[in-house]
């Protein structure tokens, strides 16, 4: 592998999309080094520093793998054989059982171009309504709440450096000190209020610098947000002029808050009333304040309303749509933002259009050269799609691009059963993920540093991903795979180009006039280093700050949501007395398929653990480092005990980066938010038991 002189691109992992140079490192292998950029300001986290290792890894897949019997081993196949096999099986299923018998599962890690072409492939080449993606696990609750409140959803509707100018920042269920370390540089100035049931690294940092840590019982954020609103109003700290001029629905929302005196809030959340008052005062009197939410607020069966409760607080204090203040959702995956705009979501067409909107259908059908009536309607959301696999009316084939649901989906043992029940499981990946290993065909694809494309980061900022080196022989890009399959299914070649630039041009036209309008984006603008934030309706446009004049609802006003507090989907009881919540470690990414294959990262955190209060551990007879079963009503996770004196005694925490018996998702609850269809990753009722012996390797 030879790497040319340093080429500037962006990290393969999270939504911060840190800028980096890829160059020849010591020993001749490619290496990464941070680049100056407004979001990461010359910083990278440990994952970014080690990202190049997987490019040349011995665990890398370089030949298509195929088997016709799941009990036998995979055998190498050439590309024509593998693609012919997949296309033939898809067409046969479609003929026998109709187009909805084949399904596609995409990812917020895919470039804009891939997300777009994958959605088009599903609707046009396969004719199926059944496409959805792992973004349902990720930010769909914030998206739903943002759309409802502001009429439009862009993670941060302002550039990240703006946040650094504020006096106070409230972070609800976000732990950027581990999940986006360079972001913490922007938070060095403001005082932080960290809302997290755990003493997370972010909460620690807040306390060190004169801020606050509010540690509610998991799942009680709505009550806490209502309590803060109550306390701010009692002290006369609401922005009544803003509420009157720029919002609607305050009184209906207030009726839910009226009962949440700080003492009542303490009863429900466990956060001392005095802390509720102090936090409300700190936030409401700040000269410049932001409320930012992460997965801790969203990943609940009431995630949309939980985010809405935090947005209500921000609106009541007059923060959104103001210079120097605001509300934002910290998106997660590399292209978590762009991935939700271009049509890989079950209910969506490119440009953030709704698939059930006749005008949207007509527009997109026009770009695609088909009749609107030829486009399928809305399909099933991710968890429902996985749940339907292999059933009488459900999909019998699944194509997976950029996700590892055997590890990352809720109630994972059930999901693995569903995955093994289909007639055809095809995974595109560069490593043998747990999901790929269950299937019939694995197609080896190019990695980030080997392909062109664009990404949209957490600020709605467009970025260029650049091919630094050629992929290994035998490897194709995702776009080439989609294009090759489409042609074999009988689509004309021009409809599914494999060249990222051509796809971006078409994506621009398809998104034109939509909420997420990319029609003025071009590779040249990005190459020239121009700052481009969507919407981009023409070649001169860029929108770094949204909502300064008006919100995106027809009347220009933001809407309070009338939301109250409600309990989690399941409760603790005598058999399952503890709450398990789940999340991330700095050194691993998601299902761990990539980072568990990077030597330094694997060595630092090699196995699953569970954080437990020492008294809770003692009650279960568990010592430090001992292996425990964490048992829920659905399944069991094997994890080593780490005692933490600062943990809530009623709550344990597990990272979800490990597979098999150590998968946190063996125990999680697939209960869904009614609006966003996002699952309850952050609350499961569990008990702890001693595990005998070492876990299976
Ligand atoms: N190192 C690393 N970084 C990542 C990723 C990764 O896998 N590893 N993934 C990326 C992706 S896709 C995402 S989505 C982001 C996620 O980024 P974050 O949202 O920061 O990550 P999480 O750890 O899932 O959750 C944040 C916090 O929510 C807390 N929490 C749990 N339950 C509750 C609750 O009921 N209320 C509140 N207020 N908090 C609660 C957890 O204790 C945790 O500290 O990270 C991105 N960055
Ligand atoms: N318990 C619990 N579970 C969770 C969460 C939680 O907080 N708690 N968080 C959820 C969240 S927010 C998310 S985003 C999901 C993520 O979980 P997943 O959807 O499983 O995401 P990854 O682990 O990133 O899986 C990506 C897979 O695709 C491959 N890949 C990466 N890039 C590409 C590409 O460009 N093309 C192709 N073809 N393959 C690629 C990788 O090698 C890897 O095998 O997990 C969710 N699951
Ligand atoms: S913070 Fe995110 S984008 Fe930046 S180096 Fe780490 S993983 Fe990569
Ligand atoms: Mo995510």
Image (cartoon, rainbow, N blue to C red):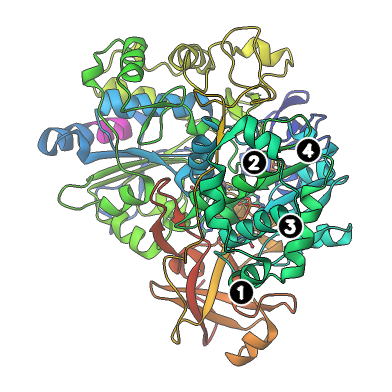
Asked if residue 85 lies in the magenta stretch, the reply is: yes
Residue hosting label 1? 267
Disc 1 from disc 2: Cα separation: 25 Å
Residue hosting label 2? 315
For the residue pair 236 and 620, the one nearer the viewer reads as 236
Q: Residue 194 carries which label?
A: 3
Q: Residue 608: x, y in percent?
A: 59, 69
Magenta residues (range): 80-87
Residue hosting label 4? 163
Frontmost of labels 4 and 1 is: 1
Q: Would residue 304 be found to the left or right of residue 160 on screen?
A: left
> Mark 2 vs mark 3: which is more N-terminal?
3
Vertical position of residue 590 compared to residue 117: above or below: below
> Mark 1 vs mark 3: which is more N-terminal?
3
Q: How crowded is mark 4: few (under 14 residues within 10 Å), some or many (20 or more)?
A: many
Q: Residues within 10 Å of mark 3 (few under 14, many from 20)?
A: many
For the residue pair 687 and 416, the one nearer the viewer reads as 687
Disc 2 from disc 3: Cα separation: 19 Å
Q: Residue 537: x, y in percent?
A: 56, 11
Disc 1 from disc 3: Cα separation: 20 Å
SS assignment at label 1? helix
For the residue pair 633 and 600, the one nearer the viewer reads as 633
Image point (36%, 24%), residue name: 120
Image point (58%, 19%), residue name: 535
Q: Main secondary structure of the magenta part?
A: helix
> Mark 1 vs mark 2: which is more N-terminal?
1
């Amino acid at each position: 592998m030879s790497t040319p002189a340093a080429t500037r691109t962006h990290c393969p992992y999270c939504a911060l999309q840190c800028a980096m140079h890829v160059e020849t490192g010591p020993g001749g292998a490619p290496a990464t080094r941070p680049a100056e950029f407004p979001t990461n300001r010359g910083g990278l986290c440990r994952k970014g520093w080690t990202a190049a290792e997987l490019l040349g890894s011995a665990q890398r897949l370089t030949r298509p793998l195929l088997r016709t019997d799941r009990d036998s081993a995979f055998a190498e196949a050439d590309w024509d054989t593998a693609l012919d096999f997949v296309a033939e099986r898809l067409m046969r299923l479609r003929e026998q059982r109709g187009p909805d018998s084949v399904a596609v599962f995409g990812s917020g890690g895919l470039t804009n171009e891939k997300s777009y072409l994958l959605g088009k492939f599903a609707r046009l080449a396969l004719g199926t309504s059944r496409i959805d993606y792992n973004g349902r696990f990720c930010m769909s609750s914030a998206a739903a709440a943002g759309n409802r409140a502001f009429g439009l959803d862009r993670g941060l509707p302002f550039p990240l450096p703006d946040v650094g100018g504020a006096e106070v920042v409230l972070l609800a269920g976000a732990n950027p000190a581990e999940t986006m370390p360079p972001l913490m540089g922007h938070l060095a100035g403001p005082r932080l209020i960290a809302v997290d049931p755990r003493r997370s690294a972010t909460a620690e940092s807040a306390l060190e610098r004169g801020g606050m840590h509010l540690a509610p019982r998991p799942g009680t954020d709505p009550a806490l947000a209502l309590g803060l609103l109550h306390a701010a109003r009692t002290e006369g700290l609401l922005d009544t002029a803003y509420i009157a001029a720029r919002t609607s629905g305050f009184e209906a929302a207030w009726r839910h808050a009226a009962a949440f005196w700080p003492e009542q809030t303490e009863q429900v959340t466990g956060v001392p009333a005095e802390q509720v008052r102090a936090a409300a005062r700190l936030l409401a009197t700040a000269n410049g304040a932001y409320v930012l939410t992460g997965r801790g607020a969203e990943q609940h069966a009431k995630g949309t309303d939980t985010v809405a409760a935090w947005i209500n607080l921000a609106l009541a204090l007059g923060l959104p749509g103001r210079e120097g203040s605001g509300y934002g959702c910290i998106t997660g995956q590399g292209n978590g933002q762009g991935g939700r705009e271009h049509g890989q979501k079950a209910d969506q067409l490119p440009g953030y259009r709704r698939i059930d909107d006749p005008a949207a259908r007509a527009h997109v059908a026009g770009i695609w050269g088909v009749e609107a009536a030829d486009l399928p309607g809305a399909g099933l959301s991710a968890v429902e799609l996985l749940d339907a696999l292999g059933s009488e009316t459900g999909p019998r084939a699944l194509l997976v691009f950029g996700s590892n649901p055997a590890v990352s989906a809720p109630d994972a043992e059930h999901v693995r059963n569903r995955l093994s029940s289909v007639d055809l499981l095809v995974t595109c990946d560069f490593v043998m993920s747990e999901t790929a290993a269950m299937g019939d065909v694995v197609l080896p694809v190019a990695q980030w540093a080997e392909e062109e494309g664009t990404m949209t980061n957490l600020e709605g900022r467009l970025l260029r991903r650049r091919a630094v080196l050629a992929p290994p022989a035998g490897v194709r890009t995702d776009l080439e795979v989609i294009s090759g399959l489409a042609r074999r299914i009988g689509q004309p070649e021009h409809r599914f180009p494999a060249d990222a630039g051509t796809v971006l041009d078409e994506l621009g036209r398809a998104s034109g006039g939509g909420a997420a309008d990319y029609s003025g984006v071009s590779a040249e603008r990005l190459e020239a280093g121009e700052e481009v934030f969507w919407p981009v309706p023409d070649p001169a446009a860029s929108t770094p700050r949204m909502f300064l004049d008006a919100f995106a609802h027809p009347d220009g006003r933001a809407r309070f949501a009338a939301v109250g507090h409600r309990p989690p989907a399941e409760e603790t009881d005598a058999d399952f007395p503890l709450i398990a919540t789940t999340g991330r470690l700095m050194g691993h990414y998601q299902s761990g398929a990539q980072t568990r294959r990077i030597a330094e990262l694997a060595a630092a955190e090699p196995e699953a653990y569970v954080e437990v209060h020492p008294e809770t551990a003692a009650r279960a007879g568990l010592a430090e480092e001992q292996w425990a079963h964490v048992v829920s009503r659905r399944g069991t996770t094997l994890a080593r005990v780490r005692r933490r004196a600062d943990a809530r005694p009623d709550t344990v925490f597990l990272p979800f980066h490990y597979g098999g018996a150590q998968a946190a998702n063996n125990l999680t609850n697939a209960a869904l938010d009614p609006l966003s269809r996002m699952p309850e990753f952050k609350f499961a009722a569990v008990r702890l038991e001693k595990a005998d012996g070492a876990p299976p390797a």
